[in-house]
């Protein structure tokens, strides 16, 4: 039984029913020439979402990604250093002393997995060389363009299967990636450090969030196909991407259609006032969605739900 058949058979009510309806609607949207951008918050790359996201990219069911700097780099860290990762199965009861011991060994914990500092060092050395080359010729590129260059042309050895990396699939497809707030990442910190120690003259070798918004606006307008959004979590990735529509319509005076399809996966509640828990109806008031836009809210763990959605698009 396929994942899709299993969901159709067993998922009928409550959040399970919402998931089944979301998948059915999304399949219809994509089959009718819709475009989909997936926004990634949290630590989805460290949770190995590439195992289900990479096939969806290769099958052209995902047409763009908007993600945090952490999700961009953590897929790359895993690609080259996964063999050095350590599982922390008893993470709920991890003591301060145990975390201090991890730090002393050069391991950095993300919930139930520890990432070796060597992963950051390996990537950092390669990326720095690309930054220095760009500065020499007066070039400036987006964060993902450096990553694509490293994956496609860099002298790196993969530690995990390339087919399980969503970045490899994205690089092969030259998929548009938008990374607002990239500065809040390990590589963002590295760039700041290399400017502080005068290895680089400035941080201008990496394009920032305003450039990313302009690029996103170009992508949104380049195709007449209806465009939908699957928001995983919330945060800057979700709000940045969805805000391109009111920016164009209200601030730039450019007539573009509203988002044509929308779904969000979140365990947050509206009562807390955060963006992650804001319901789709609230987005109507901001001119992001329309009254008739298909809208779904799956209140669950994205590490459980997102692979089910992506695997059902095959």
Image (cartoon, rainbow, N blue to C red):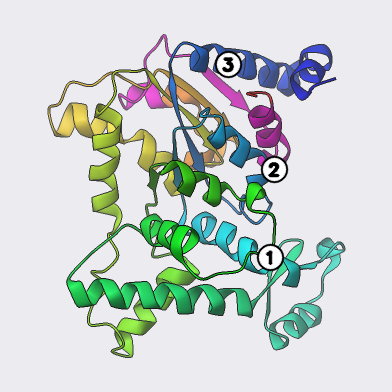
Q: On screen, 261 above or below 194? A: above
Q: Residues within 10 Å of mark 1 (few under 14, many from 20)?
A: some
Residue 241's disc number: none
- Sort mark 3 into few (<14), some (14-19) or many (20+) by Cα contacts within 10 Å: some
Is residue 290 located in the magenta-colored stretch of the structure?
yes
**Which image quadrant for residue 291?**
top left
Q: Is residue 297 visible?
A: yes
- Residue labelled with disc 3: 27
Res 306 → quadrant: top right
Query: For this view, does 74 lie left or right of residue 170?
Result: right
The residue at the point 80 percent across, 79 percent down is 98
Left or right side of 248 for 91: right
Q: Is residue 177 above or below residue 151?
A: above
- Percent across and percent down for residue 305 are 69, 33
Q: Quick one: label 2 or label 1, which is nearer the N terminus?
A: 1
Nearer the camera: disc 3 or disc 1: 1
As drawn, 1 above or below 144: above
Secondary structure beneath label 1: loop
Query: Going 23% across and 44% down the picture, which residue do you hit?
Result: 214
Using the image as rendered, state which of residue 250 and residue 232 is in the foreground: 232
User: Residues under labels 2 and 3: Cα distance?
Assistant: 20 Å
x, y percentage for residue 171?
A: 46, 49
Mark toward the start of the polypeptide (2 vs 3):
3
Range covered by the magenta-colored residues: 283-311
Q: Is residue 89 magenta?
A: no
Q: Quarter holding the C terminus?
A: top right
Picture mark count: 3
Find numbered disc 3 in the image and state the secondary structure of the residue it sits on.
helix
Residue 303 tag number: 2
């Amino acid at each position: 039984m396929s994942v899709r058949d299993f969901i159709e058979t067993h998922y009928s009510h409550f959040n399970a029913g919402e998931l089944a309806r979301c998948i059915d609607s999304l399949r219809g949207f994509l089959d009718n020439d819709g475009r989909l951008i997936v926004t990634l918050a949290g630590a989805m790359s460290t949770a190995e979402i590439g195992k289900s996201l990479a096939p969806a990219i290769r099958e052209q069911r995902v047409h763009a990604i908007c993600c945090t700097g952490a999700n961009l780099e953590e897929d790359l860290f895993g690609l080259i250093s996964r063999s050095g990762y350590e599982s922390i199965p008893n993470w709920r009861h991890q003591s301060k002393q145990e975390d201090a011991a991890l730090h002393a060994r050069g391991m950095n914990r993300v919930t139930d997995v520890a990432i070796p500092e060597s992963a950051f060092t390996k990537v950092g050395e390669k990326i720095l060389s690309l930054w220095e080359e760009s500065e020499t010729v007066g070039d400036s590129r987006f964060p993902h363009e450096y990553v694509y260059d490293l994956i496609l042309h860099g002298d790196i050895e993969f530690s995990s299967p390339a087919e399980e990396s969503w970045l490899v699939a994205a690089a092969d497809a030259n998929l548009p990636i938008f990374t607002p707030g990239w500065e809040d990442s390990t590589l963002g910190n590295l760039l700041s450090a290399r400017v502080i120690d005068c290895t680089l003259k400035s941080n201008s070798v990496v394009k920032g969030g305003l450039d990313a918004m302009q690029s996103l606006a170009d992508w949104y307008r380049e195709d007449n196909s209806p465009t939908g959004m699957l928001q995983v979590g919330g945060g800057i990735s979700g709000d940045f991407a969805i805000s391109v529509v009111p920016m164009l319509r209200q601030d730039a005076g450019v007539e573009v259609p509203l988002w044509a399809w929308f779904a969000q996966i979140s365990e947050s509640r509206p009562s807390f006032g955060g963006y992650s828990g804001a319901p789709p109806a609230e987005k109507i008031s901001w001119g992001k969605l329309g009254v008739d836009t298909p809208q779904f809210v799956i209140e669950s763990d994205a590490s459980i739900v997102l692979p089910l959605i992506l695997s059902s698009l095959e």
